[in-house]
Image (cartoon, grey):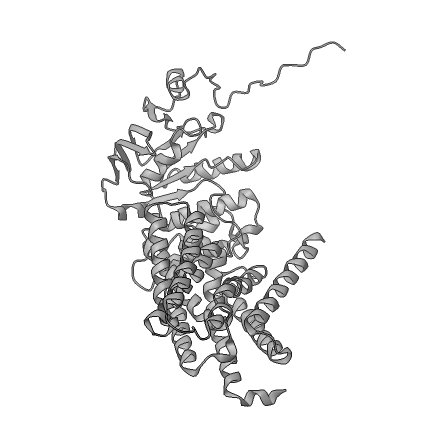
Amino acid sequence: MLEVLGFEFFRNALAAGVLASVACGIIGTYVVVRRMVSVSGGISHAAFGGIGLGYFLHIDPLIGAAGFTVATALGMGALEIRARQQMDTLIGAVWAAGMAIGILFVYLTPGFAPDLFSYLFGNILLVPWEDILLMATLVAIIVAVVAFLYRELQAVTFDPDYATVMNLPVERLSLLLLVLIALTVVMLIRVVGIILVIALLTLPAAISRLYTTRIWSMMLLAVVLGIVFTLTGIWLSYLLNVPSGATIILVSTLAYAGSLGIERLRQGD
Amino acid sequence: MSAPVIEVDDVWVRLRGQNILEGVSLAVYPDDVYAIIGPNGGGKTTLLRVILGLLTPSRGVIRILGGTEMEMRRYLGYVPQFRTFDFEYPITVREMVLSGRLGHITRLPRRYGEEDRARTEEALDTMQIAHLADRQIRNLSGGEQQRVIIARALVGDPKVLLLDEPTVYVDAPTEAQFYEILDGLRDRMAIVLVTHDIGVLPARVTRVACLNRRLYTHDTNEITPDMLEAAYRCPVDLIAHGIPHRVLPEHSRKE
């Protein structure tokens, strides 16, 4: 069983899984407590537009996705602040438009689009070494920003009105949070793919919330859960020879269902 | 009399083609307990949001301690309408109260110091919730949650405490306790209280106004029938505070 650790691709997969879990645990905590799950869904699907653009311009699709998601996040944030648009309709529009743009760009790119499927559903067993470095850099940025602005982000996600009255830069902090979500989404595309990002982003944090009373402890437990889920998923997918992204998500979903069930039983006492 | 802590000068608010506030002017002085009453939808919360700088009026100015800069908001303590934020949020009582100090910390990164922690313990004591400090806010009763919200406002050393419908979700004994607490605070800061319920005014209000788009006040602590009629657009029976009265008919005496 352990001889598989001798393969570089497998070690890379484990490293990618751990790095993705750290980002998910931290950013997913804010997504869950601030109820930004659908905004995150919109951002992640808009990423497909960036991936299509990457193919079209012959650059790394992930670079295209990063640019696209950050722009989408800032755009949605600005609209929410200024225009007070109906957010759910706006998210639906961005969600579908992002996918549509991606499809058009892929269609317009001559030739066959290699591993398009892996961007949609992820393939952690194919993460190259350079991407691990990129992920590690992003995780370092996320950890640094959250450590630096922990109290401000807590105030803004808990009670934005009160944070405004205390003269905190609420709009800039909200936009920063959206950008961090966008960067996390880009990281996760390699691991579980665009369509499944939202589950890995929210499920570990959602389970963690049931057992924690502080933001930092919720993050910590969410990171640990994320690592357990991704590593279990990678191992199972290798063992059963099934797609890794989908396996990771199903492991997480089962754990979430289980913890909700246990919680109900506990409250029933 | 000393200078007002809050001045609202001819404020108009227009939202979606409708006037919510029309030419509202009022002044709150340091020793005031100012009650603003009025029907639901009469603009009470809007007025508070304008004072707090959460909403920009279409016309008019707000002065806090004579200044119009947004930074002056740090002298305001705000107790929002109950249940307007998420009590499921993973935060302890102490952390929530401590967060009320953020307005006083400008050096980055914002870190809580000795003084912030001392003030927090003081506010927890004042509100008699020190024993709940490490509990998560969702595991508290309604009255306890409300005391946490007030403690968060107190910890910032406000010159004025603004309360939006503070008694809506609490039961009668909690309400009595709540007014006792307010009474203890009135020496330290001005208090502005907004409510739709005329029956809940604390005993020692110094000024009353009725708000329904326009503000009606005689700058005294009496509600007069003409103020109420103007605000509620219908005659309202006045019930004097503290005088017992029957709201149900007496039982007939046939045995």
> Residue at the spot x=36%, y=59% of the render?
A72
Camera-nearest residue between B167 and B15: B15
Camera-nearest residue between B218 and A265: A265
Is residue A19 visible to us here? yes
- B146 up-or-down from B168: above or below: below
Whole-percent x, y for residue B141 in the image? 57, 45
Please give the count of numbered marks on the rendered protein: 0
Whole-percent x, y for residue A85 in the image? 38, 45
Whole-percent x, y for residue A246 in the image? 57, 69
Residue A46 shown left or right of residue B88 in the figure: left
Question: Which quadrant of the structure image shows residue B49?
Answer: top left
Is residue B111 visible to us here? no
> Residue at the spot x=40%, y=52% of the render?
B100
Residue A58 shown left or right of residue A96 in the figure: left
Camera-nearest residue between A249 and B124: A249
- B8 up-or-down from B232: above or below: below
Residue at far top of view: B254
Residue B243 shown left or right of residue B9 in the figure: right
> Residue at the spot x=41%, y=77% of the render?
A136
- A203 up-or-down from A4: above or below: above
Whole-percent x, y for residue A94 in the image? 41, 55
Residue at far front of view: A111
Camera-nearest residue between A248 and B254: A248
Residue at far right of view: B255
Question: Which quadrant of the structure image shows residue B16?
Answer: top left
